[in-house]
Image (cartoon, coloured by chain):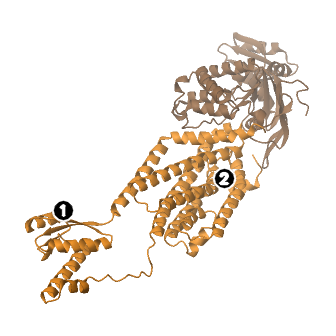
Chain colours: A orange, B brown
Amino acid sequence: MTCERSLWPIVARREFVERVRDRGFQVSTSITLVLLTGIIVISALFNRPTTFDLGVVGEGSGQIAGDVVAAAKALGIGVDVHQLSDAARARRAVDAGDADAAIVDAQRIVVRASPPAQLVGLIQAASLRERSKQALVSSGLSEQQVDQALLQAPLPVEALQPVNAQRKEAASVAFVGVLVLYGQLFAYGYWVASGVVEEKSSRVVEVLLATVRPSHLLRGKIFGIGLLGLAQLLLIGVVGFATAQAVGTLDFPSEAIATLGLVVIWFVLGFFFYASLFAVAGSIVTRQEDLQTTMTPLTILIVASFFIGISATSSPDSTLAVVASLLPFSSPLVMPTRIALGDAAWWEIVASVVVSVSATAALIPIATKIYSRALLRSGRVRIRQLLRSREA
Amino acid sequence: MSGTADGTRALELLRLVRRFGEVVALDEVSFSVEAGQMVGFVGPNGAGKTTAMRIALGVLRPDAGEVRWLGRPVDAQTRRRFGYMPEERGLYPKMRVLDQLVYLARLHGLEPEDARARAAAMVDALGVAERGRDRADSLSLGNQQRVQLAAALVHRPEVLVLDEPFSGLDPVGVDVLSEMLRGQADAGVPVVFSSHQLDLVERLCESVVMIDRGRVVASGRIDDLRAADPRRLVRVEVSGGGDEWIERVSGVRVIEPLPDGGIVELADGIPQSDVLDAARSVGSVRHFSIVQPSLSEIFRRQVMR
């Protein structure tokens, strides 16, 4: 028995190295990274704080533009003012899209097609105030009196459901996390299943069984593929985080890192659970074509969990999300979101981990038993029959 | 356990029993293969050859009986020093040939460096060195067979068990493999292989084990089995005589018809001269000899009865 311990790491090493070398793996990893960085960069471009270009022509327009800039700043909107020499040039600038709007002689607002509502609203308010001021001054009031009357603080706004920026960002990060977790669990689970089928269909398994025990073969396969899944997940996480930081998408980077950590932990928890099931699905068939059929229940389970996970990013406290975050097959796709959004009680987290670990611990011996007994059988094997039969 | 007290350098299968549901695949099968011996394992399809070999390799478990090597029951660790070639050939289709051999050598307990050196030496010895970096599924069937053999030998096995190693080989391949196995046996490795090609077994092996319906029906040196065969056989051919006349000689049973005669078995009390006289009466006798039963004839007699 002394030599037994050293065999499954050799198996795991092969699983890892052969797959890293696989051209398909390299290509799909690159595509994933390109897509991820692309999505982050594009979404950053769309979410950039709004800035308007405002053309100004003629007397009095500059005054209004100054008011617009001040009012816009209070709303978090940037306005760049461009002084233009005449009305024709202003029209051309607006028509060419160089300016979003132009104030002509403090008399007229020129826009291209549909007016940018925010900007026009600001200009209207500023011009109204300016004209009111002039009207009041010309009717005999002092400028000071007019300013006193007109320069009032804006009304305070009371939001009944205030937007929590941190929570909003956490939900987006969790959404990406669920997406990636789903992809990793599915892809790497499938690899375990198809790896088992490959060994059966190529008959190499009989050569292996002459020196490796089935349980060690299975352990090596799950660890090797799982380690690769984890490495790829970390790579995706690090690249995604670095990109988001570089384009300034993340306002709360440490929270994003914490969520990434949760995703990694629940990948490990979920992978061992699903990998055992996928190994069983692979061991009871001999041909890759038959694998789809035996994987169907698993596919349904994992896809359903994925949708619950997605819904949990918007409503983490729904009964469905709470229950799903405790069940071993769905918790990996739901619990990280609930924790990231701060909706999971500590006892729920503990319960979820305990349930997941003990379900996996209970599952592995059964899966190993089925796997061991099915390895040398060809065709579609029935699980119940295997559990009743003797070992090899 | 007795350890190596009796000093046997032999692989022993002792009273192996294995059932698959209602079917008894092995019914107290016992035989042994001495160090340096090459033993042919023969029997009709479904006789239990593969089951016995799988049990020897620990791929299957017996319901009763045990397998011993050097006088001790074999465990998983001992089996790692065995070499095995299953009937259903198996390689990783997408894995490079050399990597594959290194991997198997490692699984059999070789250190990484030794494994690499041995793998390179094996592909060299089997003439597939230039294909070492290719994927296994890009090789011709003949070359895959060579790699399979390399896989069985890469870890310098102390015992070799091969299930139908010659099936699917062309004559050149048969010669290469025969030579390799002979070399292994000469180096003191017990070699046992199953085969349907009895002429090949007869040529390569001194000893055979014959199995039928899960029982060993005969085993030992081929010469001894011949000597123990009580039948008197005569081969007779008459130029242009056809094969009809021979059937009419009384006290004679045709074992193997030939174009102008055949190999016949003489009943008790029938002298060989009866056959010769009958042959003379048909035409000019081209061949007349007393023959020893071939392995196929011994096999047929053991299995058909």
Residue A60: quadrant of the picture? bottom left
On whether disc 2 and disc 1 are found on a single subunit, the reply is: yes
Q: Decide: marks 2, 1 in contact (CB < 8 A)?
A: no
Report in which chain the residue with disc 2 lies: A
Report in which chain the residue with disc 1 lies: A
Task: Tell me residue B249's x, y (percent).
Answer: 78, 20
Q: Which mark is residue B108?
A: none
B208 left or right of A70 in image: right
Q: As rendered, which of B63 and A129 lies closer to the eye?
A: A129
Q: As rendered, which of B208 and A128 lies closer to the eye?
A: A128
Residue at 44% in and 47% down? A30
Residue at 63% in and 51% down? A279
Residue B256: quadrant of the picture? top right
Report if residue B166 is visible in the image. no
| Mark 2 and mark 1: Cα distance apart in space | 70 Å
Residue A240 higher or lower than A344, as above or below: above
Q: Which mark is residue A98?
A: 1
Image quadrant in which the N terminus of chain A is located: top right
Q: As rendered, which of B60 and A138 lies closer to the eye?
A: A138
B183 left or right of A241 in image: right
Q: As rendered, which of A354 and B141 lies closer to the eye?
A: A354
Residue at 61% in and 58% down? A270
Q: Which mark is residue A381?
A: 2
User: Mark 1: which secondary structure?
Assistant: loop
Residue A318: quadrant of the picture? bottom right
Task: Tell me residue B295's x, y (percent).
Answer: 76, 23
How many C-alpha atoms fall within 10 Å of the one at disc 1: few (<14), some, or many (≥20)? some
Residue A127 higher or lower than B72, as above or below: below
B216 left or right of B195 in image: right
